[in-house]
Image (cartoon, rainbow, N blue to C red):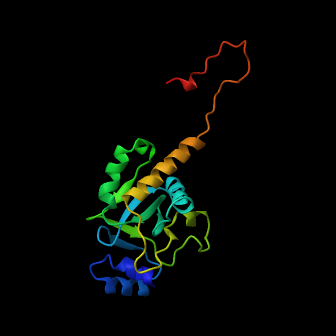
Amino acid sequence: TEGAAWLASAETYPRSALTHWRTRPTAPAVLPCGAAFDVVSVPAVFGRRMLDRLWDEGPGSGPVAAHRGRMLLFAAPGTAQRLPSLLEWEEWGAAVPSVLCHGTGDAVTVPPLGATADAPAAGPAARLESRWLVAPGTRHPWLPGPEVLLWACVRAARSMASSAVRISIFPGGDQDAKVYDVSRRR
């Protein structure tokens, strides 16, 4: 497919990579980052929130894979270098859980191209395996840059903060009780 050709373009010898994938279509691959794409890796739940924001309120995403409890968002080259400093500068950056940015000199393991979220699961363990959530389907997919991913991180962090439920161990409404609710103390 055109998506496989795009992924293979990251390799030094793209035709060899394509031949390998044709002979072993269920094998994952290790691809270098930095030339064709960078990869931003976030915890799966937070990544799902980011992906929801990107598709519901934003411009969408490039290819996205799930791998070992993390979500791999494919991004424009250079994103891995710029995103950490943008998150550090952003006031909501501290609320964003461990973002790993893979760029020039790094490599990532990607699922086989036939492994998608729509594929039938063999059981609960199958959910933890690598799979594509948004498979690369074109030769030149749109890849978000650092500003778009910063926007998605901030939106996801804000949604997590607003959905957090405050639970108090103190019952409400008893005016005679000498109980002090310290959960709101600064």
Q: Residue at x 73, y 12 (%)?
A: 176
Residue 133 visible to an observer of this rendering: yes
Out of 67 and 78, give the one closest to the viewer.
78
Residue 24 visible to an observer of this rendering: no
In this rendering, position of residue 61 left or right of residue 107:
right
- Relative to 146, say whether 93 is above or below: above
The x and y percentages for residue 60 are 50, 65
- Relative to 45, say whether 76 is above or below: below
In this rendering, position of residue 180 left or right of residue 74:
right
Query: Which quadrant would residue 36 be assigned to in this image?
Result: bottom left
Quarter of the rendering occupied by the N terminus: bottom left
- Relative to 23, say whether 94 is above or below: above
Q: Residue at x 32, y 59 (%)?
A: 80
The x and y percentages for residue 86 are 35, 50
Q: Residue at x 41, y 49 (%)?
A: 98
The x and y percentages for residue 104 are 27, 65
- Count of all numbered marks drawn on residues in the image: 0
Q: Residue at x 45, y 68 (%)?
A: 62
In this rendering, position of residue 126 left or right of residue 14:
right
